[in-house]
Image (tube, grey):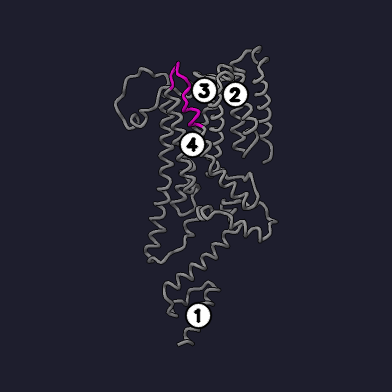
Amino acid sequence: MMKLVTIRLLCLLWMYQSNSFLMVSSFGLSSPLLIRVKRNINQQQLLSQNQPENLCKQGIICNGLGARNSNHQSSSLLSLSSTSVTEKLSPKEDVDDASSPFLNFLDRTLIGPIVRITNHIPAVLTLFYFGLVSMVSMMNGGKMNAPMPMPTLSSVLTRFVGTTSNAEFSKLYPTLITPSNPVFLIWPIIAASQVITLSLSALLATSGSAPLFDQNDLTTLSLSNLIATAWIIIASRTVVGDVVPIGSILVLPLVPLISGYQLRRRERERVRAFGEKNHKSPLLSSDFVFQLFGSFTKIASLLALTVELQHGKRILPFLFYNRPELSAFVFLYLYSTDILGKGSIIKRIINAVAVAGIWSKRIADGTLGSLLFSPSFWITSGIVVSALKQLFDSE
């Protein structure tokens, strides 16, 4: 009996080293023991797949540092959070458990894809509502006494939306750093980028491949869309003669803060693992959407702060109220120190377009005399030159 047990253990050891299971059943091995052996081997294979060069190909991290020694690579991989690795793995790489083959097949082909597609639904719904509110706000512009239409689903969902569009809101509270109207067309571009990437991510999830958005991405995007929608509703309910709504300065800065969460999180992981920054993300990726969303809303938040300083009477009114030059200095200082020339090429394009829109509106609205003796105009001109020059700087 002992001899038979010894032979079985030796065979099991040989099969463990060679990753072979063809002869397992003939030796009468129990199912739990076989499952444990399979899991150990799958874990070894998964660890080998999670080497830096493989992770870079999957878009999780990018080494860019081929000269790293193996000890540093091992410690760096251990420092990555488990969610960062497993969230990007393809669903086809899931390890089968002790369930029946039928349940494993059902999970892979039906239940798994349904769950992964369902994860995208909140982001899609919040994007739809964000687009609906934006469209209604633009269509309602100036319709103060319009007759009440028959109730529809759209009218019920947008009953809180007022009659002031973004362009009209800018006219109610003018500043020296308000961009020209074409700059605000970035909102449809942001929405379109979400539509394209979310659709592609859902298709990849259906086919069993790794989606573009993991669960953290989708939750972050949903929250960003909801907060941006709340800001549009707050601005749309402003009428002539009202004080600047306090919600504008309180709500809008939350959008770049939340939408940039995933970017900051991934950068911390790359720095912790390989000391790398300014990673170039693919065009069709969740990073692209967050960079686009966060960059513009960060500039919009600075604009909201300037409007509050100049028109709000709540922040140092003796210094900033009804003083456009001083209020503009705050925006230009924060822009030049915290935004200008920083981040990826997507961020720099957005920054350059925004400040160029500010500069062009100053020229269109001002007279030669007012521009010559305006310090904020000359500072804006210098920032425009710097922003355009930095578009061609290497990252």
Please say if 172 is above or below 117.
above
Q: CA distance from mark 1 to mark 2?
A: 76 Å
Among the two numbered marks 4 and 2 on one chain, the one whose residue lies closer to the N terminus: 4
**Does the magenta run of residues contain 241?**
yes
Residue 192 circle label: 4
- Which mark's residue is nearer the viewer, 4 or 1? 1
**Does the magenta run of residues contain 102?**
no
Q: How many marks?
A: 4
Instruction: Pinpoint residue 54: horizontal percent, then vertical percent.
Output: 59, 57
Q: CA distance from mark 2 to mark 3?
A: 25 Å
Residue ID for mark 3: 314
Among the two numbered marks 3 and 4 on one chain, the one whose residue lies closer to the N terminus: 4
Q: Is residue 379 left or right of residue 95?
A: right
Among the two numbered marks 4 and 1 on one chain, the one whose residue lies closer to the N terminus: 1
Instruction: Pinpoint residue 150: horizontal percent, then vertical percent.
Output: 29, 26
Residue ID for mark 2: 358
How many C-alpha atoms fall within 10 Å of the one at disc 2: few (<14), some, or many (≥20)?
many
- Which mark's residue is nearer the viewer, 1 or 2? 1
